[in-house]
Image (cartoon, helix red, strand yellow):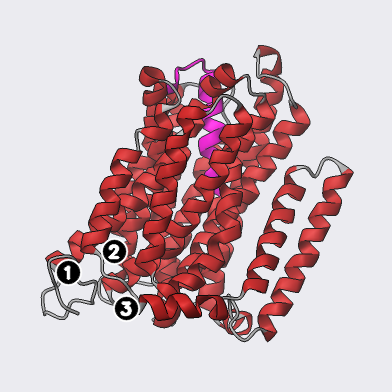
Amino acid sequence: MSVDKRSVSAAVPTNAASSASTANWIALFSLCLAAFITPMAMSAVNLALPQIALDLNADAVRLSWLASLPLWGSVIFMLPIARAADIWGRKRLHLCGLTLFTVTSLIVFFVEHVNQLLVIRVFQGIASSFIFATSLAMVTTLAGQKHRGLFLGIVSTCVYLGLTLGPVIGGWLTHFYGWRSVFWLPVIVILFAICMIYYFVEESSKSVFADALSLRKRLDIKGSMLFASATSCLFFGLAGIAQWQYVIVLLLGILIGWLFLKHQKVAQEPLVRIDLLMQNRIFIRSIASSFCMYSASFPILFIMSVYLQYIQQMSSAQAGEVILLQALFMALVAPFAGRLSDKYEPRIIATMGTLLFVLGAIIIAAINVESSIVQVQIGLIVLGIGFGLFSSPNNNAAMSATNPEKLSVAAALLNLARTAGNMFSTAIVVVLFNHFIGYYTITEEQFPDLFLIIRISIGLCAFYAILAAYFSWTRGKIR
């Protein structure tokens, strides 16, 4: 691949030097910028929730939906977008996602009701499916075999740093500029990321018009519709499982999911080759451990922001600064863990991370009204170290066990596991809020119920991390 004025090659470096080429580092920076700012903008809303509730008169259940609906929007499109990216071009669809995210973020200026904001959050989730279905595949191609763990560690750090720094930045923005700034201010960075990716990342597909014409024929439309229907029924059925009508929706989702799997076995151009996937023990168990670990990690940001602001009476900015500890330690550990996974078995490093995460969850679960902030900080630090040890080695193992021609689908499945894990555990939190508090504004009278929700949620997070440890250790060796 050649370097011209408009693009920098994403080819694997061939020189004898141990470090990647300057061109590759610039391209990696471009992708990392988008990988950081998108989840940051998504998670920043968590610290703005109390202010949004006050301004838009939103109840507790709608507040929990603001955190979970983007996950639904992301999951239903993840696999079809990944398949389209392998056919049409990863860079094109990545840029489409960033553009859609920009537009939906700016529409917040016109929001006057919480339901309008919920719609915006859904479209932000859809935009994120374009971004995350393609980013890991592009980074894997960029890194080659020699630097795969390091590059994946860096991009994983950016994603998780964005997720964790989001509440911190969201708290500051809400405190000084109001909750709407949480949506529109990141647009400045997103526009810069769009320019960087356009100029410095090479497209994976050259034939634009031929691929566009064949896209509909090669994309499994029926499978895409079945997948979207199944995940939607599972998500909304789980979120409302306290009512019998939603139990029927949940069962319908399981049935449609079975039809999706059956269709994938007979389709000419399936979204996923189920038979081949199940034979790849390393990949399938990496996916399972990723699902469990992200199920464990995602609710903690929401739960801790609620605990610190309502129970500890902190401002949004102060709460964000406490939560920042988890992100900082994860950011310090993840690239180092990724580099280690290039030399040693990823399952050893990743499993150590899951067990440390369990320890951190136990520390957090022991908090009460009289607990010091130091205990919370220690728990968050242990959580950050544990997740940092897990994320990049797990991704390295999964992508190393993948056919290069299917990197987008493999990356999408990893991100699908992450997002589905987030969606699943957040839906459980929605169920808890619905059952114990319901459609009431959170006041001091609800604090005992709020504490019960926190303890149950953190206990479940520890359980999910234990499952992640099992799948991580039993995945097998990649060398």
Asked whether residue 51 appears in the rendered view, the answer is yes
Instruction: State the SS at label 3.
Output: loop
Q: Position of residue 354 (x, y in %)?
A: 50, 55
Instruction: Quote the CA–CA distance across marks 2 and 1.
Output: 10 Å
Q: Is residue 288 left or right of residue 254?
A: left
Specify the amino acid type for callout 1. Answer: Ala
Viewed as shown, does residue 119 lie left or right of 448?
left
What secondary structure is found at the residue carrying circle 1? loop
**Image coordinates for residue 127, horizontal then vertical, percent:** 48, 52
Residue extent of the magenta highlight: 296-316
Q: Residue at x 11, y 79 (%)?
A: 16
Kind of residue at badge 3: Lys
Say few, some or many: other residues with alpha carbon within 10 Å of mark 2 (under 14 / 14 to 19 / 20 or more). many
Q: Which residue does the numbered mark 1 point to in the structure image?
A: 20
- Would you identify the image quadrant in which residue 200 lies? bottom left
Which residue is more in the foreground, 2 or 444? 2
Residue 151, numbered circle: 2
Q: Which residue is mark 3?
A: 206
- x 71%, y 72%: residue: 260
